Image (tube, rainbow, N blue to C red):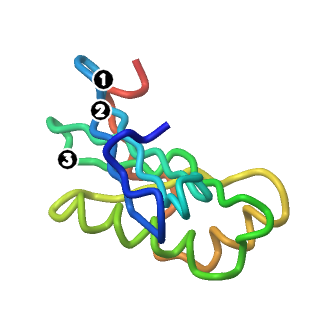
Amino acid sequence: MHDQVPQQGLVLVAHPPRGGALTGRIELVLDGTAIATLTLTCCLDCRVASLDYIHVVAGYRRLGYGRTLVAAAHARTTGYRRTAPLPDGPAAQAFRARISYPHPEASCVHQRQ
């Protein structure tokens, strides 16, 4: 799965956007298995970063892994206006309420096309 990632311990892996794309992925990998994933779309023109999706495997929730991914996203988007859509489902909404991301009003005009 992750050829260059250590197979033991907890590792933060950043996958940059592929050619022509704006969306990258950040994962937390524990002992070779991805336990949390975040996707982040950045527009260089608008300087807007959108936290599009975050998922933590059920057995690893409420242990700080989601907040770690959000902190990694913040570190990668210094100088950007940040936004995140309002998620569906009670667990996702509860998590969203606890992180410091503005509501979706700061969207990028390029992503709406």
Residue at screen point 71% across, 71% down: 60
Which is nearer the N-term, disc 3 or disc 1?
1
Q: Which residue is disc 1 drawn over?
A: 21
Which is nearer the N-term, disc 2 or disc 3?
2
Circles 3 and 1, Cβ within 8 Å, touching? The answer is no
Nearer the observer, 7 or 19: 7
Nearer the observer, 80 or 36: 36
Q: Is residue 56 above or below residue 19?
A: below
Residue at screen point 53% across, 54% down: 32
Q: Residue furthest right?
A: 90
How far apart are the two marked residues, 2 and 1, measured between alpha carbons?
A: 6 Å
Q: Residue 31: x, y in percent?
A: 55, 62
Mark identifier at residue 17? 2
Q: Which residue is disc 3 drawn over?
A: 47
Q: Residues within 10 Å of mark 3 (few under 14, many from 20)?
A: some
Residue at screen point 41% across, 51% down: 26
Q: Is residue 112 left or right of residue 93?
A: left
Q: Is residue 46 above or below residue 59?
A: above
Circles 2 and 1, Cβ within 8 Å, touching? The answer is yes
Q: Is residue 113 above or below residue 8?
A: above
Q: Is residue 63 left or right of residue 88?
A: left
Q: Residue 3: x, y in percent?
A: 37, 39
Q: Residues within 10 Å of mark 1 (few under 14, many from 20)?
A: few
